[in-house]
């Protein structure tokens, strides 16, 4: 056909221009791969551990965009955010009670230690290092307390375990932010014994309270009696004092003339049989003399 050009087909069944296009595409893909492998973006809260032909560099990449040598350098991203490790732990208390607990550890690795941790432990440092240390510290601390103390002093036990974890993990660049004992679980026999003890303690407290109330009431009653007796004694004393004061006034008001006047006004016309002198009573015998005289007179009358 006029105006139409036919290209000679290659032996492999392709046309010369098609082969050129394929080469260009392959070259473009290769360039794209090289370009993508020549940089690394480190997200926030992470660091990049650089490895050059497998050798770990002590210098880590901080957050942001970084260039690297493609196919020669590789970058492992390590998280420096706070991470949570929660697990079950079993231990024996001081009084030989089996303690099953659930614990939660909040931790993070320092930026400067990222390369060292990757080089010496790897990315699975949680399983390799943290898990074993947590179990060890939990068993060690639990053995220092009785089962009852583990319940009543949970915060103290938790703080002790956190301190122990820091001592063992800080040297690796791992820091404990918070340690929580989610719960303790004991045997049914122990739970029953604890419940019985609590009931007994409550009954003892109730009994002591009732006794104290009885003592308070008794003291109040005794105090009331003391107050009443004191008031009665004061009243008797006051009455006696008033009587004494009255007698004193009466004594002071009785003069000799008044006494003589009283005697005269109250005399019934008969001579007294006794006379008092210096508070002594003497029988003057007036009635006896008169009787004798009367008897004598009656006897002498017939002779006349």
Image (cartoon, rainbow, N blue to C red):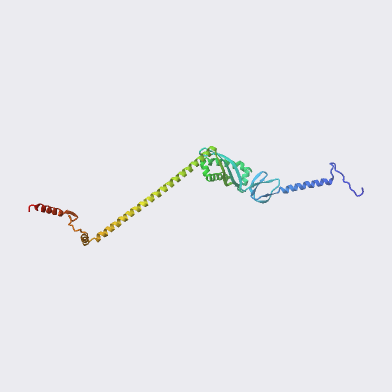
User: Which residue sits at x=29%, y=56%?
Assistant: 243
- Farthest residue to the right: give it: 2
Apparent side of residue 278 relative to residue 132 in the rendered image (left or right): left
Can residue 232 be seen? yes
Apparent side of residue 135 relative to residue 212 in the rendered image (left or right): right
Q: Nearer the viewer, residue 112 or 101?
A: 101
Task: Give percent across and percent down for residue 127.
Answer: 61, 41
Can residue 284 be seen? no
Task: Give percent across and percent down for residue 164.
Answer: 54, 44
Task: Give percent across and percent down for residue 128.
Answer: 61, 41
Q: Nearer the viewer, residue 108 or 216?
A: 216
User: Which residue sits at x=59%, y=41%?
Assistant: 88
User: Which residue sits at x=48%, y=42%?
Assistant: 203
Q: Nearer the viewer, residue 216 or 90?
A: 216
Q: Nearer the viewer, residue 137 or 69?
A: 137
Task: Give percent across and percent down for residue 260.
Answer: 20, 61
Count of residue discs: 0
User: Which residue sits at x=34%, y=53%?
Assistant: 232
């Amino acid at each position: 056909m006029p105006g139409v050009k036919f290209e000679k087909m290659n032996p492999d069944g392709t046309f010369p221009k098609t082969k050129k296009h394929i080469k260009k595409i392959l070259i473009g893909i290769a360039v794209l791969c090289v370009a993508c492998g020549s940089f690394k973006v480190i997200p926030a809260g992470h660091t990049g551990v650089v490895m050059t032909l497998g050798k770990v560099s002590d210098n880590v990449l901080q957050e942001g965009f970084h260039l690297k040598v493609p196919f020669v350098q590789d970058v492992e991203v390590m998280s420096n955010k706070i991470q949570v490790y929660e697990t079950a732990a079993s231990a024996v208390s001081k009084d030989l009670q089996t303690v099953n607990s659930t614990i939660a550890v909040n931790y993070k690795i320092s930026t400067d230690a990222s390369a060292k941790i990757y080089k010496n432990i790897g990315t699975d440092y949680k399983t390799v290092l943290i898990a074993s240390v947590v179990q060890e510290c939990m068993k060690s601390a639990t053995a220092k307390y009785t089962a009852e103390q583990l319940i009543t002093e949970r915060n103290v036990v938790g703080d002790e375990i956190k301190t122990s974890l820091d001592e063992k993990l800080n040297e690796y660049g791992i820091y404990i932010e918070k340690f929580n004992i989610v719960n303790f679980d004991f045997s049914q026999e122990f739970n029953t014994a604890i419940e019985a003890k609590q009931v007994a303690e409550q009954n003892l407290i109730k009994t002591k309270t009732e006794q104290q109330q009885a003592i308070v009431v008794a003291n109040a009653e005794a105090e009331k009696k003391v107050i009443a007796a004191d008031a009665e004694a004061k009243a008797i004393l006051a009455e006696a004092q008033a009587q004494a004061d009255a007698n004193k006034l009466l004594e002071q008001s009785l003069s000799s003339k008044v006494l003589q006047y009283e005697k005269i006004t109250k005399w019934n016309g008969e001579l007294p049989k006794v006379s008092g002198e210096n508070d002594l009573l003497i029988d003057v015998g007036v009635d006896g003399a008169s009787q004798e005289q009367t008897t004598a007179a009656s006897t002498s009358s017939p002779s006349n």
